[in-house]
Amino acid sequence: MILVILEKTMDGICSAKNVLYEKYPMSARMYVTSRTDTAQLRRLETQPLLCPGWLIETDYDVGKDKLRKIGTLPDCNMVIINAANIKQFDKVKELLHQLNLSFKVVDNRVPPEGQIMGYISNELTIAEDAARYLIKKYHSYLPDIVAAVNTLKQFSFVDKQIAKRYSPEANPLALYELVGYLIGYNSRITYNEAVHIVYNYRYGSAHLLTYLSETLMQYVLVYEQIELGLLSAENVTEFKRGASINEIKDLNSYQILRMIDSYSSVSMEKLWYVYLKVKSIKKDRYSLYKLIYLLKLGK
């Protein structure tokens, strides 16, 4: 079966794929990219341990040949194709039609309100009307909700008044784009947009600095594994299964693949430089000004 999952979640929060992940152990999963080689794909021809079939995950732009290969595997396997927006969905839908492959669509662009409420309630001690306010304010857009939740974690209890005053302005730009801008990788935002994201965290600057430093260190650790010859785009699934570094185990396959892709354009020296600059910023009332100054590196 082929499922095209139309969603844009943060770190798997409220993802339609979570139900499938629960059914398939890591030993029965494979993430297929355009760089996955023939030897890797041959593994899909044999039944995995502890499961009748494979859970094969890929992205909308994997390519026609790879899609034909995984799309014609026996029905005991489950293929999920990620599409983050309608443009990506239309592209993969056209390709599937060209290949004469049947598929089903799961539209999870707006996750069920109950799931989002559950996520907010698990992360915060919060009044119900405050949680509903956040959902309404951000129109159920998960990247913004996650950013707001992380900002509000500084409070022992969040009522509606606190949620209104301290939650960041609605921002369609995902926070992780800020890291890409800082290191000069695949930047989808302008300098002014990056400054606007930082300004939105004027009440949550401590969280923002922690997020940036932790994510930059994850880049460093991934680069180290690449340089040791232990990690590549072809063995992400196997590497995650045996990973002993907690900071990498916490990443999903898509995040690791983005970091691997950045390796050819962002040097280790640049990563360390930006990381140390971010770490040197004290979490005080001047921290946002210092971070905005640092953003000029990406101009």
Image (spheres, rainbow, N blue to C red):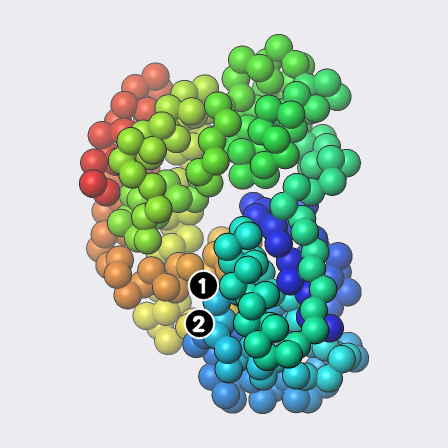
Q: Position of residue 140 (x, y in %)?
A: 63, 34
What kind of residue is marked 2? Answer: Ala
- Say which residue label 2 marks: 233
215 and 63: which is toward the camera:
63
- Say which residue label 1 marks: 257
Please give the name of the residue rendered at 66% of the width and 77% of the height, measured from the top-left corner. Answer: 101
Please give the name of the residue rendered at 70% of the width and 24% of the height, measured from the top-left corner. Answer: 132
What kind of residue is marked 1? Answer: Leu
Separation of residues labelled 1 and 2 (CA atoms): 6 Å
The quadrant of the rendering that contains the N terminus is: bottom right
254 and 139: which is toward the camera:
139
Please give the name of the residue rendered at 65% of the width and 66% of the height, measured from the top-left corner. Answer: 80
**Is residue 75 toward the left or the right of residue 280 in the image?**
right
Q: Position of residue 262 (x, y in %)?
A: 33, 60
Label 1 close to label 2 by CB (< 8 Å): yes
Pick out the residue farthest to the top.
161
Q: Residues within 10 Å of mark 2 (few under 14, many from 20)?
A: many
Element carrying mark 1 = helix
Q: Is residue 26 visible?
A: no
